[in-house]
Amino acid sequence: MAGVSIRAEQSAINVLLTAIFVVAIGLIWTGNSQPDERILTLRYLLFALSGLVAFSAPYLLFPDRNAPLIQIGNLGNQSLQHYFYKKLTPVLWPVILLFFVILFGDLSAPVSYLPLKFIYFFAATILLAAITIFAVARNVKSGPASQFWKESERGKKLRQDAANYFKYPLDPGSIPSLINTVLIVFFGALPILIGTVLTGLFPAVSELLLMAMMLLFAVWSFRSQKQNLVCNYYSTNSFFREFFGSNMKGEELSEKRKVEQLWWTPAPIRMHVWQFLIQLDRKIPAGRVAFAGHAVILFLAYQRPDAGFLLVTWILFALLHHLFMLMTFQKEMAPGWLHRWIDSPANWFAVRFWMQLRWVLPLLIGMNVQYFIFGTPDFALQAIVLTVYLLSSALLAGMGSAALSKEARI
């Protein structure tokens, strides 16, 4: 079973469009930057990726819809490792391509400082691989500990104390995930900080060696549970399936998010928008992800980069909000036949576009908080960010509607 691969295949057109998008963003971001500015941008990006990987890893991995097929195929440890690699490759290759464009997309001097660019490209790629492997290792074995905290008397007491003293409905089963998040962020951020110091004292290759050491540690951490990998995978997948099933039931979500709260949505599509938001709430806590992104951008602004860098950062962050809309194109969330049966492609375009309008106010608040503290982005730059965001929202929603219309004609 070593060659088994259970994953959604990426079409050639999707790969091409993703590559074009990543190259365009990289060239806009750092096309005319100096080598030291490129390296600084890369470090900021790696720092942000550490937090993103730490937060998103459990949601990307579990609950795994392919678990029944893996169980039927009786995959062993080696096959399961190969499966994780195949599952994460579509997520990682655009980021690695962005690393390459940031370093080598030098429009003013494309062949200058090539050895230095190669060193930092390999260092960034190795660190990203290390963070990902470490995140997989930590999250795969979190199931038994999470089950213990959820069902034990200590967990019940902790839930009660949190409710009594902090008035917060803490689920003890999430404690191992919270600990993993902190450890993964620390694992990714520490070598970036140490590498910055090393580069000031030793040649740049010392930073590459440091990242290689982090990769070796991550691989060791993953392989140390090799004998228990399959058992840990099933246990963790079962816990997360139970966790999401018991803590995010449709009835509870309906109580948390009522149709009447969507006053900003036109009445004919309000019910459809509400249903999509309920589905997304089951899948991923979008609000916490967006809040974490705002915190990262404030940290970047604290470093006092130039206004152009922050403008591109805000544009990238705004475009990342479209990942929530792209999730609504998944067949398990919105099958094409159901779409065609319920409403027209034009209305589904409006649904997805209006869904994205909910992020306009948080983006405005975040940009104005930063403007109040750091003096950028000003109102003109904010208008650029919102224009790009709204136009791209309409473009992606239109592409989805076009695909739906094409599917209807087949």
Image (cartoon, helix red, strand yellow):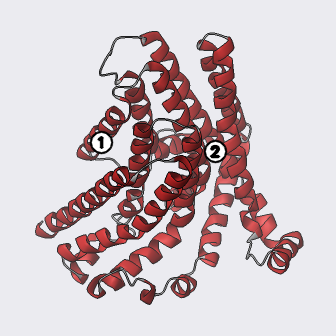
Residue 73 in view? no
Picture coordinates of residue 86, whole percent (x, y): 47, 42
Q: 144 left or right of 327?
A: right
Residue receiving disc 1? 21
- Distance Cα–Cα, label 1 vs label 2: 27 Å
Residue 390 in view? yes
Residue count near mark 1 (Cα–Cα under 10 Å), binned few <14, some 14–19, many ≥20: few
Q: Quadrant of residue 354?
A: bottom left
Q: 275 left or right of 13?
A: right
Q: Nearer the viewer, residue 135 or 64?
A: 135
Please give the name of the residue rendered at 14% of the width and 64% of the height, measured from the top-left corner.
406
Q: Say what secondary structure mark 2 lies in.
A: helix
Marking on residue 60? none
Q: Say what secondary structure mark 1 lies in.
A: helix
Q: Quadrant of residue 89?
A: top left
Amino acid type at circle 1 is Phe
Check the picture and name the quadrant holding the C terminus.
bottom left
Picture coordinates of residue 5, whole percent (x, y): 45, 45
Amino acid type at circle 2 is Ala
Residue receiving disc 2? 135
